[in-house]
Image: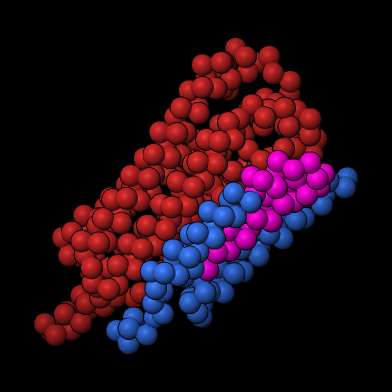
Chain colours: A blue, B red
Amino acid sequence: MHEREEGRVRTGYATYVLVWLGLMGLTWLSVTVAGIEAGALNIAGPLIIASIKAIFVLAVFMHLKSEHGLTRWVIIIGLIVFIVSGALVFSDVAYR
Amino acid sequence: MNETFEKTALHRDYAASKLGMWLFLLTELGLFFGPLLLYVMHDIRHPEAFHAASSGLDRTIGFVNTLVLLTSSLTAALSVASIRRGKTELTLIFIFVTVTLGGIFLVNKYFEWTGKIAHGIYPGGDAFAGLPPGEAVFYGLYFFATGLHGLHVIAGMLVLAIAAVLTASGIVNKRDFVKLENAALYWHLVDIIWIFLFPFFYLIS
């Protein structure tokens, strides 16, 4: 068990700070994109940016990129189930 | 006999602790997934009303609160990074900053909510009853989703406070830090939920 614990990947402080700076920048970008009169981009833009931000938080802050085995697959499959059900509901309601 | 007991007492299953936490976090995502799906369905039905209601929210407060919560997520991640390096004091400082930022988020939310409630816009309020159906649904979902999220922020602050006590008492340390790591995971999830609530309620309608 100890070997496994010692073997875990350790993320440096600088990586966390860089990701945080990126997240702050993306937040500013989402507000800017929402303010531009660009039709569908007004809706898609902020949601795509939010998804990118969530992926960064999951991968780096929550260490998903260094998870392996069962844990990693449980998380990925769980997230896919949410994405697919969301897409199915959206396509059903939007194109009814 | 004694040796067997010691081995059992020292046994820690790091992978199982993390897996259990992640399964719980997935159910938490499901909790917020429902209201967001409802939001999408009603937004498609009442686009003008959602737009009108959304412009009644203060985008600046939403933006500031997003920055506050993202920063608190950074300090939560740094607290775990610090305990892994055996820096207990630094860990406690980072947890303290995280909890304080959570408090600032809630204070902003309090001012935002009371602003709406003062105008009678809350489920059961006078002005709320007179709103067009689409706007009433928007504010209903707004109060439900942000209220539920606020409760999660409070829960996250409590869990982090407990993790701080465990760290200060040495139970959470360089070799055994999964309790703090799981507390931080919970906090990051609260952050991820807000990352989606912010564009849905403040930006895209």
Q: Is residue B8 magenta?
A: no
Residue found 41% across the figure and 80% down from its top = A9
Residue found 59% across the figure and 35% down from its top = B59
Residue found 25% across the figure and 75% down from its top = B175
From the image, which quarter does the N terminus of chain A lie in?
A: bottom left
Q: Quadrant of residue B56?
A: top right
State the residue in front, B21 or A25. A25
Please tell me whether residue B58 is drawn above or below residue A90 in the rendered image. above
**Extreme-bottom residue of the structure:** A3
Q: Position of residue B186 (x, y in %)?
A: 43, 56
Q: Position of residue A8 (x, y in %)?
A: 39, 81
**Extreme-right residue of the structure:** A96
Q: Is residue A38 magenta?
A: yes
Please tell me whether residue B136 is drawn above or below residue B60 in the rendered image. above
Main SS class of the magenta portion in the image: helix
Q: Quadrant of residue B187?
A: bottom left
- With B45 as the anchor, is B29 left or right in this view? left
Residue found 11% across the figure and 82% down from its top = B2
**Extreme-left residue of the structure:** B2
State the residue in front, A66 or B5. A66
State the residue in front, B23 or A26. A26
Q: Position of residue B17 (x, y in %)?
A: 38, 69
Q: Does residue B87 appear anywhere in the picture?
A: yes
Q: Does residue B31 appear anywhere in the picture?
A: no
The stretch in magenta equals: A30-59
